[in-house]
Image (cartoon, rainbow, N blue to C red):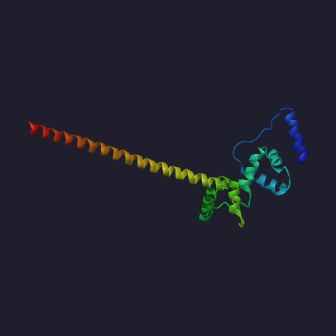
Amino acid sequence: MSNQTTNTIGKSLKKHNIKRAKVLGAYSEEEDRQLINLYNQHSDKVNKWRIFGDLLKRNHKSVRERYVNHLDPTIDKDQLTEGEKLKINSLQADPSYYKKWAKIAEELSINQKLRRTELQVKNYWNGKTRSQGRKLEQSNEELRSKFKYLEEKVKEQEEETKAKQEIINNYEEMLEN
């Protein structure tokens, strides 16, 4: 389907206020194969994602995301190395890189055969911060528990001191009388 044909169909549908039926949900293996084949045949086309979306009856943004983050053969799908994790951590500390996932992924992929996606970088970072948040919350809960225990001990000591002071006061009163 040519770019002009796709645009004509799109304009016609808009003119008549007709919406294209789009598939929702997870991609099937067949859709993945079709998308890979389409990309291999038409990767040079300017408006390729819209064309692919129309052919697959999917939103063009979804089609692009699926290919760029999951199907592209240049993606390194192994777990992040310790070195990559350290580099992400150090780049996140730099304000010019903070939460700029694409820029960080590009930085990780320099001089590498395979590349990391911005989604991989973002998922690592968010998982790490979520884990740290849970550890911090657990630590805070332990501290609250210890603080409560200490408060109870202090209260007991104060009550004991008060009781002893009453005994001393009563004894002094008896001696005076």
Residue drawn at x 30%, y 42% is: 155
Nearer the observer, 177 or 154: 177
Which quarter of the figure has residue 108?
bottom right
Q: Residue pushed farthest front?
A: 176
Nearer the observer, 83 or 167: 167
As displayed, is residue 152 above or below residue 85?
Answer: above
Residue drawn at x 88%, y 36% is: 12
Relative to 24, 150 lies left or right: left
> At which x and y percent is residue 129?
56, 52
Q: What number of labels is visible? A: 0
Residue drawn at x 59%, y 64% is: 82
Relative to 29, 88 lies left or right: left
> At which x and y percent is residue 125?
61, 54
Image quadrant for the C terminus? top left
As displayed, is residue 43 above or below residue 82?
Answer: above
Which quarter of the figure has residue 111?
bottom right
> At which x and y percent is residue 175?
9, 40
Relative to 64, 165 lies left or right: left
Nearer the observer, 125 or 163: 163
Residue drawn at x 65%, y 52% is: 99
